[in-house]
Amino acid sequence: MNLSNTNRHLKEHIRGGYSLDWRPQALLLAALAIMFLPWLGDILFNSKGEPREAIVAVSILDSGNWILPTSFGHDIPFKPPFLAWMTAVFALLFNGGEVNEYVSRLPSAIALIALCWATYRWAAHSRGGRFGLLTAMMLATSAEVFRDGIGCRVDMVLTACSVIPIFILDRGRKHPSAWRYVAAAALLSCATLTKGPVGSLLPCLVTGVYFLLAGERFWPTLGRLTAVCAVSFVLPALWYYAAWQQGGQEFYDLAYEENVLRLTGKMSYESHVNPWWYNFMTLAIGLMPWTLLAVMAPICIRSKAYIDLRRRAGRGRLSDAGLLAATAAAIVVLFYTIPASKRSVYLLPAYPFLCYALAAVFMRLRHRWPASVMAWLLSCLAVAAPVGVLVYAAATDGAISNLGYAALVPPMVAGAWWLLRRTRPVASSVICAAAMYIAYHGAAGPMILNAKSDEPLAREIARTHPTGPVYQMADCKASRLFTINFYLHDRLLPVSAAPSDVPRGTLMLIPAGVDTTGLHAAGWSTPELLTERSCDFRKPAMQAVKL
C-alpha cells in the first residue's frame, strides 16, 4: 500500500467510514446468484443429514401441523422449525407444495447470499468497496461455507441469523436507531428458532465483549444487549411452549438434551466427540483455498512509513472492524472448544471475521510474489479441473447435463485469462476460485454424488410397492433410512421387532447390524441384499417380504 492510498484510507476513517456504491453490491449479488442458485436441485440427497431436515417440511405440509410435526410415524424433530418453515413456504410458493432438493436447499443458499452481502457492507464501511467485495467473495468461496450454502441443513441459516445482527448492532453503536435494535432482535429470534438459545446468546456475548473493548460503558451495554436478547426470546418461547403442549415430556427431554446436555457433554449418546484441537484443524480445511494466505501472513509486515502515518493519524490500534473481527473469531472458536461435541459447521459464525483478516492479508500482499503464487495455483487448477471432470466422466460413463457442461467453461476461461495476461492477481484468484465452485456445483458434484444416492432404490420400491407403509427394522434413530424415507414421501415406519399382523407382500427394510431375531417366526422371508452401501450410514441394507 503506497502512502497516498494509505492517507486516503485514513481520511475516510476520520470521516466515519466509506460510503457504499450500488455497483459493487449489484456485482456481488449477481456473482452469488450464479454460483448458488442454478444447480441447487441437481445433486440428489446422498447422506442422512439433508433428507432428515427436508422430511420435517414434508411432514408440515402433509399434516398441517406447523408446531411439532412427526415423521417416520412418530419421530419429533431434533431442532426448532425455522428451516422447515422456510422450506415449506418455498415449496408452497415455487413448487406447488412439493418439497424437492431445490426448495429444501434454497433457504441455505439465500441465507449465504444475505450473509455475504451483509459482510460486504460491514467490510466496505471500514475499508472501501473493493475490500468489501474481496472479503465477501473469499467468504463465499471458502470450502466449508460453500458446502453448507448448498445443503439442506440448519447451519447456514443459523449463521446468517446470528452474524448479521452483530453487524447491525455494530453499526448501531455509532448510529443508534430503534429499527436497528428491532431488526437485530428479529433475526436473533430466527436464529433461536433455528437451533435453540445459543443462536441469540452467542451473538449477544460477542457484541457485548466487543462493545466493552471498544470503550463502551459496562452497564449501558449490558442493559441494551440484555433487552435485545430478551426480546429475541419472545417468539421462540411461544413456540417452545406450544411444542411442549403437543410433545409433553418427550419434547422436554429432547430439548433439554440438545440445548443443555450437549453443551455440558452429558448427552445420553456420543455425538461428534472430538479433541480440542479439532476446531483448528477444521478451520484450516474449511478456509481453503485461502488458508494458504495465513501461511504467508508473516510476510505481511507493515513498512515503517505506514506505521508512522497511522500513529500520526491516531490509528496505532486496531480499527473498529478489525477489533470486532478479532473478538468475534476468538469467542466463537473458544466457545465451541468447550463442548465435547465438535463439528466443523459449529464454527461457521467465525468465517466472515476470519475472511476479513485474510482479505486484509491478501490486499497487503497484492503487489508481492505470494499473490502471484495464489493466482498461478488457482488458475492452473481452474484450467485442469474441468479437464479432469471430463476425463472422469468418459472413464466412468458419468452423466453431465447440458447446463453442467456449460458450468465447466467459466473456470477454463478464468484460468486462461490469468495465464495469458498475469495481471490483477487478487481478482484473478477470487474469480478462478468462484468459477471452480460453479464447475463443481453444476457438473462434478452431480456426476459423482448422484451415483451414491439411494434415490434409485426408493424409486424401485415405489414401483413395486406403490401404496401402503414400508416397515424398517430400527433399534435406534441412528439407523433410520432417511434418504429412502424422503423419496418414499415419509412412508417408512420403524419397528423394533418384526410385526406379524401385516398384509402379505408388505416390505421390510433391514439395515446391517440390526437384530433380526424373530423375523422368521413372524412370517417374513429370509432377508435379501437391498444395497451394499446405504448412503445414510455407509453399510449394507437388506429387505424382507411378509409371506
Image (cartoon, rainbow, N blue to C red):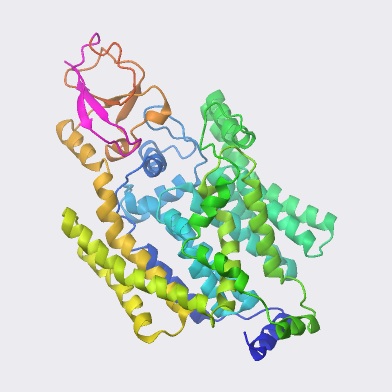
Q: Is residue 72 above or below residue 382?
A: above
Q: Main secondary structure of the magenta part?
A: loop
Image quadrant occupied by the N terminus: bottom right
Which residue is at 46% across, 73% downward?
Answer: 374
Quadrant position of residue 74: top left
- Number of numbered discs present? 0
Is residue 119 covered in magenta?
Answer: no
What's the magenta region? 521-547
The x, y position of residue 423, in whole percent, is 44, 85
Q: Does any portion of residue 42 appear in the rendered image? A: no
- Relative side of 484 to 175, left or right: left
Residue situated in front as seen by the camera: 529 or 370: 370
Q: Nearer the viewer, residue 173 or 407?
A: 407
Picture coordinates of residue 467 (x, y %)?
21, 30
Please name the residue shown 50% across and 60% down the image: 287
| Any part of residue 141 in sight | yes
The relative height of residue 385 versus residue 445 in the rendered view (above or below) is below
Q: Is residue 363 left or right of residue 427?
A: right
Residue at 38%, 86% (x, y): give it: 421
**Where the C terminus falls, by quadrant?**
top left
Q: Position of residue 199 (x, y in %)?
A: 60, 48
Q: Residue furthest top?
A: 521
Residue at the image position 48 percent from the left and 35 percent from the top: 68
When asked about the image quadrant of residue 399, the answer is bottom left
